[in-house]
Image (cartoon, rainbow, N blue to C red):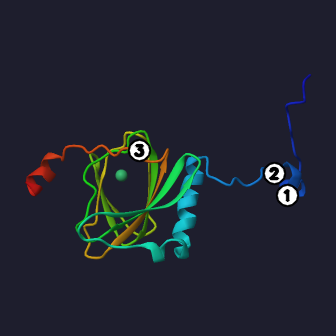
Amino acid sequence: MNSDSDLQIAGDILEVPHLLQPPREHPATVAEFVGLARSIAADRSQWEHLVQYDATSRWYHRLRTGPGYEVWLLSWVPGQGSGLHDHGPSSGVLTVLGGELTERTERGTRALGAGSQRVFAPGYVHEVVNDSLEPAVSLHVYYPGLTEMPMHAAQCATAAVTA
Ligand SMILES: [Fe+2]
């Protein structure tokens, strides 16, 4: 009987701290990327003073980089939007830090208030718009870092409105 590979711990794991995994310096799972975004969202001193609003072009700022990932801060004045796009080979976590954004996909429209998060895989197509009357701020984590953002043709209903 080979019992070498079976580790069983009876009792409180905190009683055997030498067996605990050390906390990771950088996120490595979807849950950890979501957690990173939440921790940044909760600590406004990390980003609030950096936010700028630009009515003429989209404003964004790279807040942090790590092994294989990037964290971006974006602002949205009322009416600004991303257009319909995907994120190339990148997965991402979108977190609304302030204000309200609207996400449109082929499956429908979703209002994203402060604290809302969306997680997406490569190939996910969406459009993000500030449809509200107040500015909005969002945090975007991309893994791997965003190298392309291919635009997609607007859907018929949108095209009719913007044409
Ligand atoms: Fe996006």
Q: Which of disc 3 and disc 1 is earlier in sequence? A: 1
Q: Residues within 10 Å of mark 3 (few under 14, many from 20)?
A: few
Asked which secondary structure carries label 3, the reply is loop
Quick one: quadrant of the N terminus?
top right
At which x and y percent is residue 19? 85, 48
**Front one among 4 and 91:** 91
Q: Which residue corresponds to mark 2?
A: 20
**Front one among 69 and 7:** 69
Of badges 1 and 2, nearer the viewer stands 2
Asked which secondary structure carries label 1, the reply is helix
Amino acid on which the number 1 mark rests in the picture: Leu
State left or right for residue 34 relative to residue 160.
right
At which x and y percent is residue 39? 58, 65
State left or right for residue 56 relative to residue 29.
left
Is ligand 1 less than 8 Å from the beta carbon at label 3? no
State left or right for residue 54 relative to residue 97.
left
Per the rendering, the mark at residue 14 is 1
Q: Relative to 60, is 153 above or below?
A: above
Residue at 77% x, 53% y is 22
Q: Quadrant of residue 55?
A: bottom left
Amino acid on which the number 3 mark rests in the picture: Thr
* Labels 1 & 2 near each other (Cβ < 8 A): yes
**Front one among 59 and 31:** 59
Amino acid on which the number 2 mark rests in the picture: Leu
